[in-house]
Amino acid sequence: MKSILIASTLVLSLLSLNAYAHSDDEQIAAAESQNGHAAALGKPGIAGNVTKTMNVDMNDTMRFTPATISVKRGETVKFIVRNSGKLKHEMVLGSAKELKEHAAMMAKFPEMEHSDPNQVSVEPGKTGELIWQFGKAGTFDFACLEPGHFEAGMRGNIIVK
């Protein structure tokens, strides 16, 4: 029994050391592949690699401004997301299918809190940031998944060229 405990401790120690040996990019990529959120769009970005800053406004008319955003493949974008409304809003990156499924889950569990690298929740009158590196060309989606907001049309597109 004692040898199993020692072996387990050794394995955990080696795994911990291995985690420190990886770069920030590798750790972010590993975390992204584990949770699968927005994997088709790219991966969480690193602040020091930001090449473009976009201002996005969310409001109580259930709209994003702008609703269509264009970026270049490989760009790391910092979204400065302002909530000019009186309700809580969020910007979540993902495929249309992922966003629709997540919106349905939020409707069933409206008090559910989540904090994923592909989203930012912003209280009324506040500003938040989301940094993302877009690795694949195509048209992708973002939405507010607060209960009822997605269904009310609070969605947008990101065109990656």
Image (tube, rainbow, N blue to C red):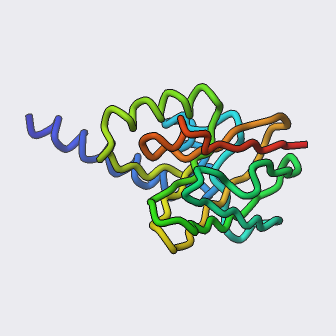
> In the displayed image of the protein, which residue is found farthest to the front?
61
Quadrant location of the N terminus? Answer: top left
Q: Position of residue 99 (x, y in %)?
A: 56, 34
Q: Is residue 64 left or right of residue 5?
A: right
Q: Position of residue 151 (x, y in %)?
A: 53, 35
Quadrant location of the C terminus? Answer: top right
Q: Is residue 61 left or right of residue 53?
A: left
**In which image quadrant can residue 105 be found?**
top left
Residue 61 shows in this picture? yes
The residue sitting at 55% across, 47% down in the picture is 144
Is residue 8 or residue 138 the one in the foreground?
A: 138
Q: Is residue 135 left or right of residue 125?
A: right
Q: Is residue 68 left or right of residue 63?
A: right
Q: Position of residue 96 (x, y in %)?
A: 64, 30
Q: Is residue 61 above or below residue 135?
A: below
The residue sitting at 80% across, 51% down in the picture is 69
Q: Position of residue 89 (x, y in %)?
A: 50, 56
The residue sitting at 70% across, 44% down in the picture is 156
The residue sitting at 65% across, 60% down in the picture is 131
Is residue 36 or residue 81 the one in the foreground?
A: 81
**In which image quadrant can residue 6 be found?**
top left
Is residue 24 or residue 57 the one in the foreground?
A: 57
Number of dots carrying numbers = 0
Residue 27 shows in this picture? no
> In the displayed image of the protein, which residue is found farthest to the right?
161
